[in-house]
Amino acid sequence: MSSTSFRVLPRNNPSISDEKRKAQRSKTLLIVLFFFPGFALLALLLIYPVIQAGYYSLFNWNGLGPIEDFVGLANYTRAFEHSVFRRAMLHNLYVVILTLLVELPLAMILALLLVRGNLRFQRVFRAIFFLPFVFSEIITGLIWRFVLNPGDGFV
């Protein structure tokens, strides 16, 4: 038998379990409060538009007038009947397969080499891969500086 000791809380002491329950509730409330703003943005900017687009796709609608002519899945059957749509879907499938089979493993191998490998010019390679992130921020700042220039900027 092991000599490990552990503390057993008595069952007849309701104040300890109430304190634990209150602590757990406050912890859960804190998690929900931190989770809610992100979920609200996700729902507002992604989930709702996707559901709305799915709803609109069931109608014969030009996007301007009232939604009246319900056609059901006829828009989808008409899309799948076109050879251009089927070819586009096939090309997308190729891109997904090649990304999963070629690009993702190569990126993982390269990342592992840059982090754990003993390459001769490891710091140079890390800098080369990090520079696009730095340059994009610099270019964005320069564009905003040009746009908001008090003398001759667009705004």
Image: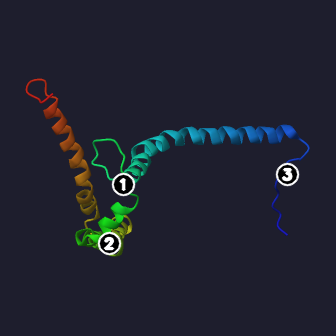
Q: Earlier in the sequence, mark 3 or mark 2?
A: 3
Considering only vertical position in the picture, is 31 above or below 115?
Answer: above
Considering only vertical position in the picture, is 28 above or below 87?
Answer: above
Query: Given the image, on which type of amino acid does mark 1 rest?
Result: Ser
Q: Position of residue 63 (x, y in %)?
A: 29, 46
Q: Are marks 3 and 2 in contact (CB under 8 Å)?
A: no
Residue at the spot 39% in from the left edge and 44% down from the top edge: 45
Q: Earlier in the sequence, mark 1 or mark 2?
A: 1
Q: Position of residue 35 (x, y in %)?
A: 53, 43
* Residue placed under numbered mark 2 in the picture: 93
Whether residue 95 appears in this view of the structure is no
Estimate how packed mark 3 is, as few (under 14), some (14 to 19) or many (20 or more) residues with alpha carbons within 10 Å.
Answer: few
Q: Position of residue 85 (x, y in %)?
A: 26, 68
Of 114 and 100, the residue lying toward us: 100
Residue furthest front as drawn = 69
Q: Is residue 2 left or right of residue 134?
A: right
Estimate how packed mark 1 is, as few (under 14), some (14 to 19) or many (20 or more) residues with alpha carbons within 10 Å.
Answer: some
Residue furthest left as drawn = 152
Question: SS class of the residue under badge 3?
Answer: loop
Of 123 and 37, the residue lying toward us: 37
Comparing labels 1 and 3, the label whose residue is closer to the camera: 1
Query: Given the image, on which type of amino acid does mark 3 rest?
Result: Val
* Residue placed under numbered mark 3 in the picture: 8
Q: Earlier in the sequence, mark 1 or mark 3?
A: 3
Residue at the spot 27% in from the left edge and 48% down from the top edge: 62
Residue at the spot 31% in from the left edge and 75% down from the top edge: 102
Of 105 and 28, the residue lying toward us: 28
Question: SS class of the residue under badge 2?
Answer: helix
Q: What label does residue 45 carry, if any? A: none
Q: Position of residue 153 (x, y in %)?
A: 11, 29
* Residue placed under numbered mark 1 in the picture: 57
| Residue 84 occupies quadrant | bottom left
